[in-house]
Image (cartoon, rainbow, N blue to C red):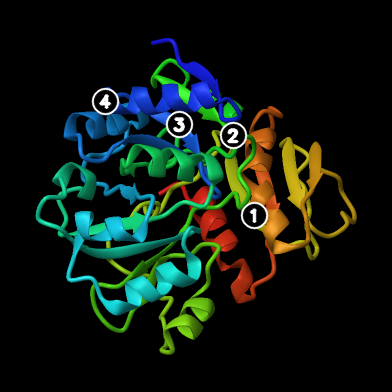
Amino acid sequence: MNTLHLSASEHKDIEQAKQILACGELVAIPTETVYGLAADASNPEAVKKIFAAKGRPANHPLIVHIGSAEQLTDWASDIPAEAYAIAEAYWPGPVTLLLNKAPQATPVVTGGLDTIGIRMPAHDVFSTLLKSSGMAVAAPSANPYKKLSPTSAEHVLNSLGGKIAAVLDGGDCAHGLESTIIDLTEKPYRILRTGPITAAQLSETLGEEVLSPKAHTVSVPGNVTSHYQPNTRVRLVDAENIEFPSEKKIAYLHLTPIIGSSPEKTKKMPEEVGAYSHALYRSLDEADKWGCDEIWVERPPLDESWFAVHDRLNRAQSKL
């Protein structure tokens, strides 16, 4: 398959992307978080192509992206008032609501579960496409299963070129980490995947505590133990008294100055969490190309604003 490289700045290319989706094919589309691999969510055969292109197990649920909060009832049932409160506060934006699925929602999207994840993306191009087409799309990250999520069209083409119909190039993604997922199917409400919107923010919005457990058994996108991985092994390290082995070539993504022995290749990471999040996947992808034996990443700060970064790094280093 020849993967088209479309420009999000060209109206004709956006229209072509809409037509490709309407014909049941896949288009990688930029969101404010990462690039999503989109298919018409109402077309089960199109959605199945997502799993084939990514090599993703069919029992792993997908997130449905909508253009307006009014579409919630097309996909979910028993929607609590808190869902609309979160939508009003943060949509369009990087928070996904886990709700009970509507009877008509195809089980291909939900991985056979009785719940469904829904969000409204904030990227202007994606928003325009959804609103102008009236379509809802299933769109996990546009990468092979368990590999690094792409934050640029180039990254998508490098990993999925020839497997999907088109990439709609909208430049780099603003956040660089996937959306927060909050479970609204039962109280107390809880975070199932950390992201740009924190539990503290959601607690303030709802006027009640939103939990953020370190472990749970709910199947949601991005929560397998090993995920977001480059091909080179990743290791999280503490900068104090660090020693780089002479027998290995180490790539080092660091925050503080390097003291003592030097690694093979280095990159200084941003100290502000938003900039760090934006740079994380791109930096791991860059380091993956350096030909080193391992990628060492200095452990970031431990306060809540960094929880999403820690979640991705912990999964990136896991080899279970």
Residue most extreme to the top: 2
Q: Could you tell me if the residues under marks 3 and 2 are in contact, i.e. CB atoms within 8 Å? A: no
User: Dot 2 corresponds to which residue?
Assistant: 170
What separation in Å lies between label 3 and label 1 (alpha carbons)? 21 Å
Residue most extreme to the left: 103
Instruction: From the top left corner, tell me how far across and down residue 252 is, in percent.
Output: 75, 45
Q: Could you tell me if the residues under marks 4 and 3 are in contact, i.e. CB atoms within 8 Å? A: no
Residue 254 numbered tag = none
What separation in Å lies between label 1 and label 4 (alpha carbons)? 33 Å
Query: Which residue is depicted at the point 68% across and 27% down?
Result: 291
Query: Which residue is depicted at the point 83% across and 60% down?
Result: 256
Residue 277 numbered tag = 1
Image quarter of residue 299:
bottom right
Give the total number of marks visible in the rendering.
Answer: 4
Amino acid residing under circle 4:
Gly
Q: Nearer the viewer, residue 48 or 146?
A: 48
Q: Could you tell me if the residues under marks 2 and 4 are in contact, i.e. CB atoms within 8 Å? A: no
Residue density around tag 2, few if under 14, some if 14–19, many if 20 or more, within 10 Å: many
* Disc 4 element: loop
Image quarter of residue 245:
top right
Asked if residue 260 shows in the view, the reply is: yes
User: Dot 4 corresponds to which residue?
Assistant: 24
User: Dot 3 corresponds to which residue?
Assistant: 28
In the image, is 137 to the left or to the right of 274?
Answer: left
Instruction: From the top left corner, tell me how far across and down residue 106 is, in percent.
Output: 15, 45
Instruction: From the top left corner, tell me how far across and down residue 303 is, in percent.
Output: 64, 75
Instruction: From the top left corner, tell me how far across and down residue 174 is, in percent.
Output: 63, 49
What separation in Å lies between label 4 and label 3 (alpha carbons)? 13 Å
In the image, is 123 to the left or to the right of 255?
Answer: left
Quadrant into which the N terminus falls = top left
Q: Could you tell me if the residues under marks 3 and 1 are in contact, i.e. CB atoms within 8 Å? A: no
Q: Could you tell me if the residues under marks 1 and 4 are in contact, i.e. CB atoms within 8 Å? A: no
